Image: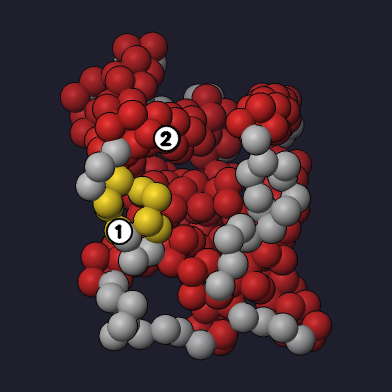
Amino acid sequence: MLGQRIITALILFLLVLAAIFFLPTHLLALLFGAVILIGAGEWVALAGLQMFWEKLAFIAATAAAMALVYPLLQHPEGSAFWLFLAAVIWWFMVTLWILRYRPERSFVPGKLVKSVIGLFVLVPAWAALVTLHGYGSEGPLLMLFTMSLTWVADTGAYFSGRRWGRVKLAPAISPGKTREGVYGALAGTAVWAALFSLFRPEIAGVVELVLFCLLVCVVSVVGDLFESLLKRQAGIKDSGKLLPGHGGVLDRIDSLTAVAPVFVFGLMLIGGGK
């Protein structure tokens, strides 16, 4: 299983790398839009949408939302700013939801609410990645760095959790995650952010970028836990079976859906890369 995961991850990494550095932003927006629509096709199970017309309506709504949002991305310091601010507020609310979650007395949204939640999760993430790619001359590199933060955090959490994991992080949501795993994710993120700042000091100072990326790391944990919560409520283990050894698309981008809009919003505030 580990070998299968590594092979799949390597293939995905090479494909993503090629797309980021060889495609113009408008074509990358179409490619990543297709990936998001695959994720929307998996979200229908999380939302409890069972009838064909319900599934089709949600996928169509996701495509329409991306089409409506795309013109806003041409003005990242204007309309798009408010989109990403709304996304940051949304993930703050999700964090509170995760912290206060108790399975015996917590509110379980219906399929309509979960469908709306799906739009809040998927569309801003796509918009953030497209914005990053077109964000000045450093856009592709910033996009890769943003995605790499989730990979580094996941890797640090995995190995740290396996080696030292003792205290459960959120047993009612994801019994396998531990606080020690989070510490490993934070440590890996701090080192990676420091290295990136030394490599590209014009983006942000070392201390500034490390502190910001530590916050982003926490957001990545929230994104991961949020999908785990929805899967637990839906009674499924993986969002799909498209990626051997990894499950579905949502299983691979759960952290990124939270990280991307938060990272872009922070980048706008500090003015990095421009």
Q: Position of residue 116 (x, y in %)?
A: 53, 78
25 horizontally vs 251: left or right: right
Q: Amino acid at mark 2?
A: Tyr
Residue, disc 2? 158
Residue 184 against residue 166 in the figure, above or below: above
Q: Position of residue 15 (x, y in %)?
A: 73, 30
Residue nearer the viewer, 127 or 121: 121
Q: Position of residue 158 (x, y in %)?
A: 42, 35
Q: Position of residue 72 (x, y in %)?
A: 55, 58
Residue, disc 1? 170
144 horizontally vs 25: left or right: left
Residue nearer the viewer, 148 or 126: 148
Give the farthest residue toward the top.
199
- Residue at (76, 86) in percent of width and height: 51
Neighbours of disc 2 within 10 Å: few (<14), some (14-19), many (20+): many
Quadrant assignment for the N terminus: top right
- Residue at (72, 83) in percent of width and height: 50
Residue 85 appears in the rendering:
no
Q: Amino acid at mark 1?
A: Ala
Q: CB atoms at circles 1 and 2 under 8 Å apart?
A: no
**Sequence order check, earlier mark of 1 and 2:** 2
Badge 1 marks a residue whose secondary structure is strand
- Residue at (21, 29) in percent of width and height: 208
- Residue at (34, 36) in percent of width and height: 161
Residue 137 appears in the rendering:
yes
91 horizontally vs 52: left or right: left
Write down the quadrant of residue 182 in the picture: top left
Badge 2 marks a residue whose secondary structure is helix
